[in-house]
Amino acid sequence: MSSYIRKAHHGGSWYESNPEELYDTLSTYLKDAKEDPASANKFKSSPNPNISTSRPRGIISPHAGLAHSGSTAAYAYLGLDEFLKSSNGHSPSSDTITVVVLHPSHHVYLDGCAISGASTIETPLCDLLVDESLRSELLTSSSAGIFTTFTTMDQTTDEREHSGEMQFPYIAKMFMDCNRKPGKMKVLPIMVGALSTDKEKIFGKILSSYLARNEIFTIVSSDFCHWGKRFNYAPTVPPGEMKAPSTISEIYEYIEWMDRLGMDEITSQEPGAFAKYIRLFKNTICGRHPIGVYLSALKENATAGKEEVDIMFVKYAQSSQVRSNHDSSVSYASAVIRRI
């Protein structure tokens, strides 16, 4: 398949197409996040010593329209900003770094993982180079004798999907603002399909050694609960053995309680526990499969002694506070992953 230039398909609707306006919007979100005292103190409460000064390795970031989730995403992207601007003897400014974006599929059925076939990704701020070398490695990789089902996206499929694209403006701004040469910064979007738990484990194992490389930073693109009749998801009574606290009286409070249970399972870094949570609550976390793959990769690396990390959620928000069955909302959560 010949490569293509991926257009900024959702520019002008999901985010500003004017470069100056987009840059100013992102700058404002990042400034507000950086100056938020609650954000600054998050990592100080971590049980892992010195975690607040350890190197960021990845983030979890929402992917709704910039006006809806951009301010929440900024809390995560402070982690990428720190990664790009730090050296710490790990990745000198002369080295090439690659940002891998694991994102879900909203428009096509996919029982596997599809890598962007683009050579360049356009954004209103600057063009992003795709790491074609890493793509080639993944397309020919295997694990335990099982040949992967990595495929390559065509341009139409790539451009229709917003969950990867909504990360690109922030990535472009981070690239513009750091002290690295443009040609030394690349991206590789990977669309993760509706995988079984077993397949999440397989793809996580395959990706693990790549994501542990010092020069690679991982972004997991996901919104959290989509609540309301238009999403075919409106439970108000906790299922199974999990019971909400008696202090919860509003639907939006229940949604946050449920989302935070899922966030706790993610921070535990146990893929099986997160999968059980999804089965129990059927929470409409659209990036649950990219999260599952990433957790499997982290567990593989920790078991192999390659890398251990700490996951901490630094911001949570809802598009609106649901109080009746006629309302709807989408939840957004940002996390920063740091090496222990």
Image (spheres, helix red, strand yellow):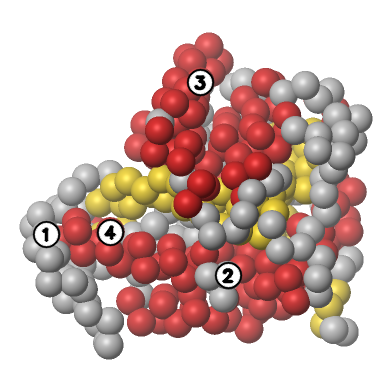
Numbered badge on residue 269: 2
Which structural element holds mark 2?
loop
Mark 3–mark 2 Cα distance, whole angstroms, equals 32 Å
Q: Which residue is denoted by mark 3 in the rendering?
A: 27
Q: Tell me which corner region of the image, top left, top right, bottom left or bottom right, holds residue 232.
A: bottom left
Mark 2–mark 4 Cα distance, whole angstroms, equals 20 Å
Q: Let me know if residue 108 appears in the view.
A: no
Decide which of 273, 116 is in the foreground and name it. 273
Q: Tell me which corner region of the image, top left, top right, bottom left or bottom right, holds residue 201.
A: bottom right
Q: Quick one: label 3 or label 2, which is nearer the N terminus?
A: 3
Q: Quick one: label 2 or label 1, which is nearer the N terminus?
A: 1
Depth check, mark 3 against mark 2: the one in front is 2
Q: Quick one: label 2 or label 4, which is nearer the N terminus?
A: 4
Can you give x and y, in whole percent of width and height, for residue 122 in the image?
Answer: 66, 29
The residue drawn where x is 46% and y is 46% is 42
Can you give x and y, in whole percent of width and height, for residue 140 in the image?
Answer: 89, 66
242 sits to left or right of 113: left
The residue drawn where x is 35% and y is 37% is 68
Q: Amino acid at mark 4?
A: Glu
Q: Quick one: label 3 or label 1, which is nearer the N terminus?
A: 3
Instruction: Tell me if residue 137 comes above or below residue 175 in the rendering.
Output: below
Which structural element holds mark 1?
loop
Q: Which residue is denoted by mark 4 in the rendering?
A: 256
Q: Which residue is denoted by mark 1 in the rendering?
A: 250
Q: Quick one: label 3 or label 4, which is nearer the N terminus?
A: 3
Residue at the top extreme, as displayed: 20
Mark 1–mark 4 Cα distance, whole angstroms, equals 10 Å
Q: Amino acid at mark 3?
A: Ser
